Amino acid sequence: MTTLPSNIARSRRTDAFTLVEVLVSIVITALIVVLAGQLMKTTTVVATSAGKHIDTDVQARAVLDRMAVDFAKMLKRTDVDYYIKAPIGYKNPNAHGSGKHLKTGQPGNDQIAFFSQVPGYNSTTSALVSPLSLVAYRINAGLTSSQNYLQLERVGKALLWNGVKNANNDPYPIVFLPGQIAVTGGPWGINANNGGWAAAINNDNSTKSADPDYAQIGPQVFRLEYYYLLKDGSIKDVPALSWDLSQTVSANLNAFADVEAIVVAIAVIDPASRLLLYNSATPTDPYIRLFNLMSDMADFKNANGNGVGAQKVGDVENEWNTAIQHAATTGSTYDGSPFPAAAASAIRVYNRYFDLKTPAAF
């Protein structure tokens, strides 16, 4: 019988791993797998969040750029009418305040309508090419079943640059008479039978609010507010340094003589997060959750009354972000209604100043 040298025997006995070494390697491998999984999960969350932010950024930029063109070419004249936030002639003077949900008849979002030198269109006269249009913006607050409900709409209604009414009332001619947009009767007023520009100053589920020329421009925008930067540096919801209630809106505006800029604030939610808010259990208002949050986002108000006493730039936007953060933290709106925290955390608020000091086009 041959006996192996002692050094060779010891070498063969130490070639294998011990049980302790195997267990340690398994634990280390498991830790690496867990850490890698956590890293991948974190990366996915960050990438998803970044993607949502990109969606809202792109939407906000497109909307605000479109507004910039319309405001830059606005007709600023004393004989041209406007439908804007003002002490008189405006249907939504600060509808609700901070933390107060909307009540029946309160629109909640601002509307604006003005004449601008931008191409217009008309749903019944597709061949018409018009260099002038009535521009209007609104968040659709009509039927909750509408596909445009709580989405930003724009109309650029084609007009003729004359005072002649054509045989078909289409397109409507522009006439330099203050009160034309919001007039309560006449061939181009808000009479539902005569057509006119009813939808530019109405926003509910009535026939006056229906207009096929409204186009969806911001499907992710659900909140719209605007106010004014005056030439003395103050920000107000009154578009003049002083206001005479006995005079018309156009007379008080004096072609925006006191207004340096219109400030527009919007709230945007990405498509994926908006889908999280759809509730099939409430078919009469499937987006009641979004409505509840929208109603928590207070109006701008610099005078006495409901709304935010916003004396500094950015106050109203900060109020909006506070309402959004409350929903993201608590999973509910101010009145306790449920709101998915993930959806709230994806909402972004934007604003832009549109300079109006440029001389009128005509």
Image (cartoon, rainbow, N blue to C red):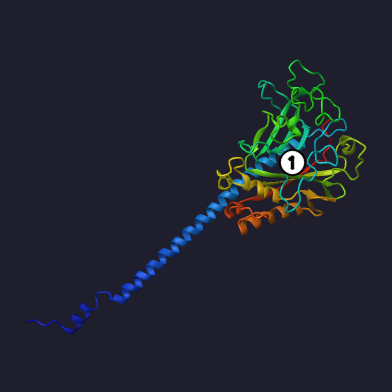
Res 41 seen here: yes
The residue indicated by pointer 1 is 105
Q: Amino acid at mark 1?
A: Gly
State the image coordinates of residue 233 (x, y, percent, origin top left).
85, 50
Characterize the local packing of mark 1: few (<14), some (14-19) or many (20 or more) Cα atoms within 10 angstroms: few
- Vertically, is 30 above or below 183? below
Task: Say which residue appears at 66% left-offset and 50% top-offset.
Answer: 293
Quarter holding the N terminus is: bottom left
Tag 1, which secondary structure? loop
Res 314 seen here: no
Report whether 14 appears left or right of 3: right
Task: Say which residue appears at 37% left-offset and 70% top-offset.
Answer: 27
Q: Residue 357's quadrant in the figure?
A: top right
Report whether 92 appears left or right of 50: right
State the image coordinates of residue 265 (x, y, percent, origin top left).
72, 47
Report whether 197 appears left or right of 152: right
> Which residue is situated farthest in the top direction here?
167
Quarter holding the C terminus is: top right
Task: Say which residue appears at 61% left-offset and 44% top-offset.
Answer: 287
- Vertically, is 88 above or below 35? above
> Which residue is situated farthest in the left direction here?
1
Given residues 133 and 310, the one toward you in this image is: 310
State the image coordinates of residue 176 (x, y, percent, origin top left).
85, 26
Q: Residue 12's quadrant in the figure?
A: bottom left
